[in-house]
Image: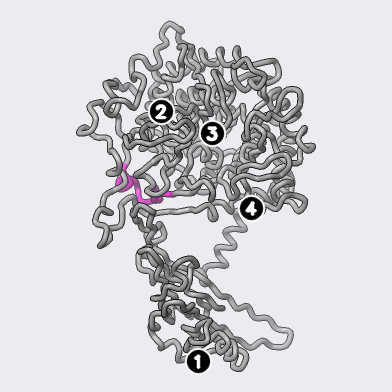
Amino acid sequence: MTWANSIGGLSHHTGGHVNEPFIGENGVSGVLLHHKTANNNPPVTFAIAACENQNVNVTVLPVFGLSGESSVTAREMWGTMVQDGSFDRDNFNAGVSMPSSLGDTVCAAVSASTWVEPHGRCTVVFALAWSAPKVKFKKGSTYYRRYTKFYGTSPRSAVNLVQDALMKYKHWEEEIDKWQTPILRDERLPEWYKITLFNELYFLVAGGTIWIDSEYLVVDADNKSNSSPIEDGDSPLNDSTCNSTVPQIGFDPHEIDDKENVGKFLYLEGIEYFMWCTYDVHFYASFALLDLFPKIELSIQRDFARAVLREDKSRVRFLADGAWGIRKVIGAVAHDLGAHNPWHELNAYNIHDTSRWKDLNPKFVLQIYRDFAATGDMSFGKDVWPAVCTAMEYMEQFDRDGDGMIENDGFPDQTYDAWTVQGVSAYCGCLWLAALQATAALARSLGHDDYAERCMIRFAKAKSVFEARLWNGSYFNYDSGTSYKSRSIQADQLAGQWYTASSGLPPLFEEDRIKCTLQKIFDYNVMRVKGGRMGAVNGMHPNGKVDETCMQSREIWTGVTYSLAATMLLHGMEHQAFTTAEGIYIAGWSEEGYGYWFQTPEAWTVDGHYRSLIYMRPLAIWGMQQALSPPMSILKAPKVNAMDRAHISPGTFQFLQDSVRKMTPKNGCFGNTVFNWDC
C-alpha cells in the first residue's frame, strides 16, 4: 500500500512534510505522514498500516519520491517489491525523515507479505486513517474535532485510529449488518427503496460534515482571541445589552450530562450552497439524524434555540431588492448557522431578509416537538421552551388582519425562495397550523395548560380561515391571490400535516380532505410528469400543465418528493407513496436515469437538467422510514382527542397581546418591548 503525503491543493508542493515509521500494539505497524498545510491551516497526519501475525510479515519504506532526484524513487520502490516482496526491516529504525523540499512529492509504502499454500487462502488487511484534530474556519475560529475527546489532540493519534480500524473493522461490519439487515430483509419494501434509503446517507459524510467536541475555541499563539465560548460571539443576550426581561435558554454544554453532551455538529446545505445547517432544508433532512443520531439532532436544535434569542446588528445588504437590514433579529429563527464563522456569525444567506420569512419559525417549533415526542427527552423540552414561545410570538406580526392566520408578503418569503407567494398560502399556512398545535402539545406536556389553550383557540380560528380561503374541493390553492397561478397544485402543500402525523398529533384537516389532496398531487404533479418516473414537480396547473411561474415552480425537488411520499405513507397510501418516491430512484439512481449516484441534486427539471449537486434535502427519504417504523415513544404516547383541542370560549382568546409585542429590529434588543412570561 502506498500513500502520498498530500491533501492536494496549494500545499502539495510547498515542502516541509515529513514521514515517520511506527510500530504500534497488537502487531500493527506502518508509516505516519505528517503534512504541513498551506495558509497556516491546521496540519494533518495520515497513517497507513497493516497488522503483523504468524502468517503476515509487515515492512515499510518510510520515504520515496516521484521525481528522479529523490533518494528513493518510485521506480526503485517497485523494483524492490518485485525482487524481494518486502522492504528492509531496519527501516522501522529510520526515525523522522528530513522535511521535503519545495516541489517534491514525498510518499510512503507498507508491505505485507505472506506464504500461501496451493489452493490456500490468506487475507491481508491494510488500513488508512488520518488525524486532523483542529478545524479552522475562514475567519480564524478554531475548534477541536469530536474524536479528540476519545483519542486526544495530538496528530500522532493517527496511530491509535489506524490501530482501532485494523482491530475492530470486523466488529464494525457486524454492527452495520445488524442495523441494515431488518430493512434489507423486509419483503414488504421495494428493492429500490432499500438501496436508496441507505445510499442517500452518503450526504452525512460527503456534505462537508464537521463535528466538534466543545463550543470553546482553541487558543492559538497567534490568535489569542480564540478563547471564548460560542455564546460570547456577536451580541450575547444579557442584562447589560438588553433592557427587556428575556428568558434565557436554560442549558450549558458543561452542565449537560456527559453521556448527553455530544459536542456540536455542522453539515452544509450543499456543496454549491455553502451554509451550515440551513434550517429550512434541515426540516426535511433531519429525519435521518433523528433516526440514526438522535443526540446530534437535539444538539442542532439546541443551537437554533439559542440563536432565537440572539441578535446581530451588523448591517447586511440583501441581494434580491438591494435593501439593507441587520444580520439576525431576535425572535426570528436563523436561516443557517453561518459560513465562515459558524455559531458566531449567523445567517450567511443574504438573498432575502429571512427575518421576514414565514416558514422558519413554524419549522423550528415543529422540529422541536417532533424531536421531543420521538425521544421523550423532557429536559430537552424544558430547555428549549423559552425559544419556542419567542419563536411563536414573533409570528404575530405576520397576521396582518387579526384573523389568526399568517399572511405571506408578496415575495418568496419561504424555502421556495424564487417562487412569489401572496396572502394566505398552502405551504406556510399549513406549517403555521401545525406549529400552533405542536406548541399546544408541548405546552401541555410541560404543564403550561393556559398557554396551550390559547394556542388551540388560535388554531381553531386560523384553520377556519385557511380552509375558507384555500380549499377548492379537491386540494388547497397555492395562495389566496386572484391570479391563475394562485390555483397551482403545490406538491409540498401538506408539509405541516407531514410533521403533524410524524409527531403523533391529530390531523390538521378531515382525513378525506388530506387523502383527496394527496391523490390530486399524485395524479397531477407525479403521474403527469413522464408517467411518474421523475418524482413530483413542485407546481402543476389544474389543466395538467407544469407551472412555469418561476424556476422553482417547474422543478422537481428530490427531498420534497420523498417528504410527499412519507405523507402518503402516513395516510395509508402506500402505492402512491412508493410510486412517487421511485421516480427519484429511476431518474437519479437507476441505470436508465441521469447518473446522479451519490450526488443527489436539490432539483431537476422535466428534461433532466439538475441544480445543486450533493444536497441536504434528499435525506428526507428517512421521513419515509419513520412513517413505516415510527419511534416507540410516539406509538406509546397518549392520543390527543381532536375534539378536545380547544374548549374555552373565543372571547378568552389573547394569544400574544398580553405577553409579547411585535418584534422589530429597530431599537435595542426588543426595542421597548416588555415581556411578561407565563410559559
Q: Looking at the image, which is closer to me, 590 or 604? A: 604
Mark 3, residue position: 415
Mark 4, residue position: 199
Name which residue type carries label 4: Asn
Name which residue type carries label 3: Thr
Circle 3 sits in a helix, a strand or a loop, which is it?
Answer: loop
Mark 1, residue position: 88
CA distance separating discs 2 and 3: 17 Å
**Precedes in sequence: disc 2 or disc 1:** 1
When the figure is inspected, residue 429 is found, relative to residue 380, above or below; the finding is above
Mark 2, residue position: 391
Q: Position of residue 181 (x, y in %)?
A: 65, 54
CA distance separating discs 1 and 4: 43 Å
**Precedes in sequence: disc 2 or disc 3:** 2
Q: Which mark is residue 208?
A: none
Q: Report the side of 647 relative to 596 (left or right).
A: left
Q: Looking at the image, which is closer to me, 549 or 233? A: 549
Name which residue type carries label 1: Asp
Q: Is residue 466 magenta?
A: no
Please provide the residue range marked out in magenta.
252-265
Name which residue type carries label 2: Ala
Look at the magenta stretch and give its main secondary structure.
loop
